[in-house]
Image (tube, coloured by chain):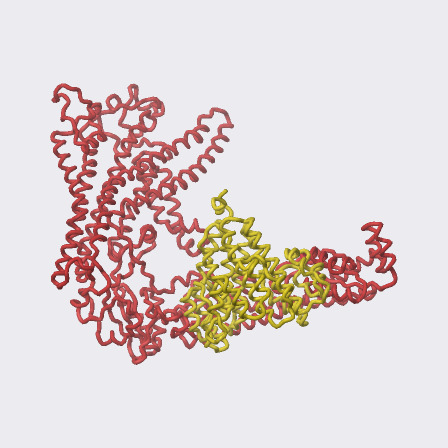
Amino acid sequence: MFPELSFNIDHGYLEGLVRGFKSGILRQSDYLNLVQCETLEDLKLHLQSTDYGNFLANEPSPLSVSVIDDKLREKLVIEFQHLRNHCLEPLATFLDYMTYGYMIDNIILLITGTLHQRPISELISKCHPLGSFEQMEAIHIASTPAELYNAVLVDTPLAPYFIDCILEQDLDEMNIEIIRNTLYKAYLEDFFNFCKGMGGGTAEVMCEALAFEADRRAFIITINSFGTELSKEDREKLYPRCGKLYPDGLEMLSQCEDYDQVRTVADYYAEYKELFDDAGTNPGDKTLEDKFFEHEVKLMKNSFMHQFQFGVFYAYVKLKEQEIRNIIWIAECVAQRHRAKIDSYIPVF
Amino acid sequence: MPIFRSEEMVLCQFFLQSEASYACVSELGELGLVQFKDLNPNVNAFQRKFVNEVRRCEEMERKLRYTEKEIRKEKLKLHDQGENPRAPAPKEMVDLEAKFEKIESELREVNTNNEALKKNFQELSELKEVMTKTQMFFMAHGEDLHSIVDDAHRAMGQEDTGIVTATQGSVQLGFVAGVIPREKVPGFERLLWFACRGNVFLRHESIYQALEDPVSGDPVYKDVFIIFFQGEQLKNKVKKICEGFKASLYPCPETPQERDEMLRGVNTRLEDLKTVLSQTADHRHRVLVGAQKEIRTWIIKLEKIKAIYHTLNMFNFDVSQNSLIAECWCPSSALNEVRTALKNGELLSGSTVPSIVQMMQTKKKPPTFFQTNKFTKGFQAIVDAYGVASYTEVNPALYTIITFPFLFAIMFGDAGHGIIMFAFGLFMILNEKKFTRQRSDNEIWNTFLGGRYIITLMGLFSIYTGMIYNDIFSKSANIFGSAWRMGDYNETTTLSEYEEYTLDPIYFFRNGTPYPFGIDPMWQPAKNKIAFLNSLKMKLAVIVGISQMLFGICLSLFNHLHFRKYLSIFVEFIPEVIFLGCLFMYLVGLIFYKWVTFDASESQCAPALLIQYINMFMFSSKLPNSTASSGALVPCSQVTFYPNQQTLQYVFVICAVLSAPVLLLVKPLVLRSRHNRKMLLSGRAPGVKSTEALIPNEVTAEEEWAYSHRLQRMQADGNTVSRSVNSEDEEVPHNGPTSIFLVEEEEDDFEFGEVFIHQAIHTIEFCLGCISHTASYLRLWALSLAHAQLSEVLWQMVFSLSLKMDIAYIGGIAVFALWFAWANLTIAVLLLMEGLSAFLHTLRLHWVEFQSKFYEGDGVNFAPFTFKELLKMDSLEDLK
């Protein structure tokens, strides 16, 4: 009757843990210190005084940005795996759902890589460890989507999402993009329905987050499709139908032909209007992508205001990802001595 | 007296020549008596002066950590020979760096070689396995590949054979063989099936012996597989899948002769490799043993260097004089040692300009520092666990040394148990050198070891109280001869024959001297033992408790005198003593009075303490003598103890009640009027939110107390320090003591409401506390009763059963077995569990009932910069 009453029995420990992890997220003052760094060694020294601790202590100098990236990611993965290993149903399924997105990205990365004749071992190291699965490394045997499905994906949790894109055509760039978006669409809708089925605080928080994710994808797909051979009908098929744009907004989006028309569509929705209004392409302006990220961070921070729900796990991973992007951005700026744009990270807290 | 109050601290400023600063800080670290302040709290870690040196240290640390890990991998231990090398001079850092670099690169080289060799070895042994397994496989099924497949299909089901034989012979079957980790086999098999649509044929077999992973050295279990397929396209696919699953493929010749040939070659190569491997392992071992001897020294040296540079990073740099400016707290008694240490540092570094030590005046609260020895350490820890003493307030640890074991022993009163506890404590003390050197990881054992002196004293005191209670494993000892006599008592009868007697002093007490020490053993078998002991122990508990509380209040007098809070003596200390004295000391007085004046013959008509005490508060006592009253029969218990009792009690109660408002109101009102007067003098309207000191008399008092004999701060030098950084510090660079304590703006607002509420809380806490704490001390009685009863039950229910058993021979066995049970239960329940519970209750009595009377406990512990902790480490990882 009241799922909140018994929430703590199964998930209280992990929720507490994740809220503890959250307090280790870098704050504005940390970023202010980080942007003052002259070298990557400085960066390492400052990160030592934060929650990251000695995560770089065993790395020989000189540091490179990619090493920092790997280590940052490794820390997140260790934390996530710890949560995953200690959780009970339905949180286990929820966390699994979170990894599916990374799996899709990995599959696409591998296929694109093989298309470009890159060796598989080099590609594997670039995959996100949260989305790795057993059959992943054998992906390059497939040359058509049908093969991909039959040989590799049929045993993975992604199989049901793949049903819509089984074609006998050869894989090419366009195809891959379509596969990625179809998979993502199916994944988001499935995850959305799962969360909705959970009810309570989880549904409240997660549906909002996933709806935003879906709408963001719809906008990006539309904007990126201008000037390609993707037809309007095909494009419409790629829109995830679980966001606030569904159904009218998606209908309008599918008819758009340039950026301004997309903008008109966004004008109908208060929260998206704001994002489009502030975004610009001039130097000094924030890009639309950054605005989306900012909005995401805001949503994720809000989800920590609710208790007894799974949204915090999702939010933590998303915020941590944003933090990793920020640190890497700063590290790149420091490493390349290109300090003009070092401030365009997106502060979390 | 360093344990009565914490050490007097001074804030010093050091001007160190930059070339001498390293050596000086190193000397101070060895001394371990100064606590440096961070003078650049707003500077980032990576913008500090010595960040490069710190980084070099971290790099060296990384190398050492690697070396240590390798040493541990080789199952070698780090030995602690008690070495304490000094921190090397900064120029020696380069040598250390080179040394570590050499060791690390040597180790890495050895390891890479070793890994390559091992990898080679692994591959060869896998190849060998592949060869033997395929050989066996082909032997079993014949050389013709088709027949193998046919065999398999026939085994699977008859209907398939037709299809296979149809394709038979038309295409040449190929095969690949290889090795795959065992856990990947099912997925591999399934993917092969899906990807090749069932057109390949896989056989796999386990390698029983675990192979060694070349990098980590962990055992890996693998399977040999052989895959048959048809055509070039499938071959590519199979190879890709193998690559995806990290399966290693090995060339496998088609004919048996070639396979035999290859197997022989592989075997000889394996033998060669084994010798090479053992040689590299020997070499590696030699390198590591060499490093093992010195690594502890290295770690200590390195950590000292790092600590020194971290400390130097907290200093200010004065460019004009090329010197570093440090600020630190140090005990004023240790100033000479500090100066000597600095001189040594100068000598070591060969600096010509001496460093300057200068006292500073500050309003910051100094840290609390008690010099403890191994005996007082445990007791100080008990007090510190509640709260670190405020600077120079009375330290309860001094009294705790005696009162703690004593209160414990009142609850744990059994001489037998006391002896065991004492012996255990003594055992730890006698072997303390050995035990402390062992550095056990067992937390429970370390707790016991840390409290060894407490345990010993607790045991000793328990023996004493046990003798008073006359309880030795719940039995009594009749040493001096009982002072009681039974009707037919003679010297030959034993006490146990009187089990059923109720002792009544009128009939049984020999009118001679009572039992000279403790409780008469006659009470042990008596029926009314509990009634007697309850009355005695309860009264003792109240007496002990009230005395301890009164003592606590008296200690607050020392605090008031020390901090010159004379007002508090009159409006806090005296009302508190009156309150406690009139109500509770009077009760104690009544207890003694009753003990002294009423003997057994009058006991039937003695006034009851409880009723008298209640009547005192109800103002409703009866007349002194029942016979003198107007004929109505007054129960004996209601009769007063002495004439004029009622009047005296009226006075006491009224005094106590009146002291409460004094405690509550006077202090805030006096403070306010003082404050207002000051405001008027300084020309500001009273009541306006002011910036004056909270309690003016205390500030002036502090001024005289702490700073009257301090050196003045040198104005000239003070200006060179960059003030912008530590503008928050309260140091005031004025010329003389008169101006220093002009109170600064923005702090010390006088808020009447706040002061009043604070005082109200204190009053309520004290008055209610007196009552509830007195009741709380009754736990002394309750626990001692429980302990005595529990040990008696254990004796009667377990051990005495065996003594009563009257069976030949078997009785002996029963005695043995039941003694064993009794002894174990005594240790586990009575000593450990009861001991722990008594310990906790004692702890509570000290923290809450005793310390709340005078102890403030909001100080900060003195955390000196010292290398001592470094020497305790076992590994580099411990230092994180």
Front residue of this view, candidates A8 and B800: A8
Residue A199 locus on image (x, y percent): 52, 49
Front residue of this view, candidates A224 and B5: A224
Front residue of this view, candidates B143 and B728: B728
- The answer to whether residue B124 shows anywhere in this view is no
The vertical placement of A167 against B453, above or below, is below
Relative placement, left or right, of A124 versus B369 is right
Relative placement, left or right, of B626 versus A199 is left
The chain coloured red carries which letter? B
Front residue of this view, candidates B752 and B863: B752
Residue A243 locus on image (x, y percent): 55, 58
Quadrant in which residue B119 is drawn:
bottom right
Quadrant in which the N terminus of chain B is drawn: bottom left
Q: Residue at 21% across / 32% down in the picture?
A: B614
Residue B787 locus on image (x, y percent): 36, 36
Relative placement, left or right, of A194 versus B756 is right
Quadrant in which residue B867 is drawn:
bottom left
The vertical placement of B410 against B495, above or below, is below
The chain coloured yellow carries which letter? A
The vertical placement of B202 against B551, above or below, is below
- The answer to whether residue B325 shows anywhere in this view is yes
Q: Residue at 47% across / 32% down in the picture?
A: B818
Relative placement, left or right, of B440 versus B404 is right
Quadrant in which residue B262 is drawn:
bottom right
Residue B445 locus on image (x, y percent): 43, 49
Quadrant in which the C terminus of chain B is drawn: bottom left
What is the tally of numbered marks visible in this picture?
A: 0
